[in-house]
Amino acid sequence: MRRIGKHISIAGGLVRALERTRDLGCSSLQFFSRNPRGWATSPLSEEDAEAFRETRAALDIDPVVIHTNYLVNLAAPDPFIRQRSIEAFHDELDRAERLGADYLVVHPGSSRGASVEDGIAACVDGIRVAARGLRLDQAAVLIENTAGQGDCIGRAFEQVGEIISRCERDVPIGMCLDTAHTFAAGYPLQTESGFRRTMGTIDECVGHEKVRVIHFNDSKVPFGSNVDRHWHIGLGEIGTEALRRVARFRKLAHAPIILETPEDGDRTETWNLNQLRAMLGVVELPEPTLEQARPASRGRTAARRPARR
Ligand SMILES: [Zn+2]
Ligand SMILES: [Zn+2]
């Protein structure tokens, strides 16, 4: 059966995140292994790492995905930010390996006024330097495509493919495909023909087999807006039909599907997971209530956790 999961908070500890994953009926999870918006971090003890690995094996949670801290900007031209980012990414890779995680997802970063070419070169170099001295037997880096906000690189699959091909001799690496970012970056997932073209472009630039994880999110913002705002499955601008095409696309059926949707009111984690399960044909859903079917544009904005991932 298709592996599905959710981005889970590690409040209460790493083992608790695994238990919550099981309680949600999921077989995979993603989490931040350190504070997502700060540089400060407390070291991971071997005891905690071992407890995580053992519980994960006992609960058969696979894959385990870690999302890199948002401050890490491997494409930054500023030498100070760049150095800090490389050190933090090295630490993330080390933690991922010690936890037995399968993937470490990272955004390629922002070139902050420098050219896209320079941003890509800095990102490639940053990943290779950060991985130096580490034995990565388990964890692979996944480059996530982005919405293309500001000077963020990774909005075009060509850019993601270039980063991967320039790193793959030195570092185990693949891609994480985010549906909301793809749509906001201007790839027309909302139509059948646009979907086919987009999947074709991914295959040409990266290769379907290198897409190791799908971040499955609807978008609160319109097509091509270059803004990164995730929304409830089926209630955003991408919509149910288009998301169903992604979920059921045979050539990406090897990739686990992970939700990074917000939670509010009765649109809970389970509600969103059930929308995905219905698309995969695993559950049948009752008709949505009016409250649940409220469109994105009139929805409440307060999500319990920022939906930018
Ligand atoms: Zn994502
Ligand atoms: Zn992300």
Image: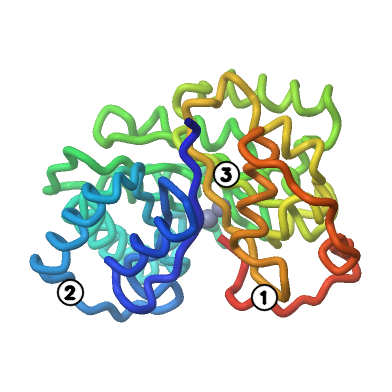
Q: Earlier in the sequence, mark 2 or mark 1?
A: 2
Q: Residue furthest left?
A: 46
User: Residue at (41%, 28%) from the top-left corner?
Assistant: 165
Q: Earlier in the sequence, mark 3 or mark 2?
A: 2
Which residue carries the number 1 mark? 303
Q: CA distance from mark 2 to mark 1?
A: 30 Å
User: Residue at (79%, 51%) from the top-left corner?
Assistant: 286
Q: Answer above or below: position of 59 versus 214.
A: below
Which residue carries the number 3 mark? 145
| x then y, percent, for residue 8 | 46, 64
Of labels 2 and 1, the one closer to you: 1
Which residue carries the number 2 mark? 43
Question: Is disc 1 in contact with disc 3, using a CB cutoff of under 8 Å?
Answer: no
Secondary structure category for the residue under label 2: loop
User: How many marks are shown on the rendered structure?
Assistant: 3
Which quadrant holds the C terminus? Answer: bottom right
Secondary structure category for the residue under label 1: loop
Looking at the rendered structure, the kind of residue marked 1 is Ala
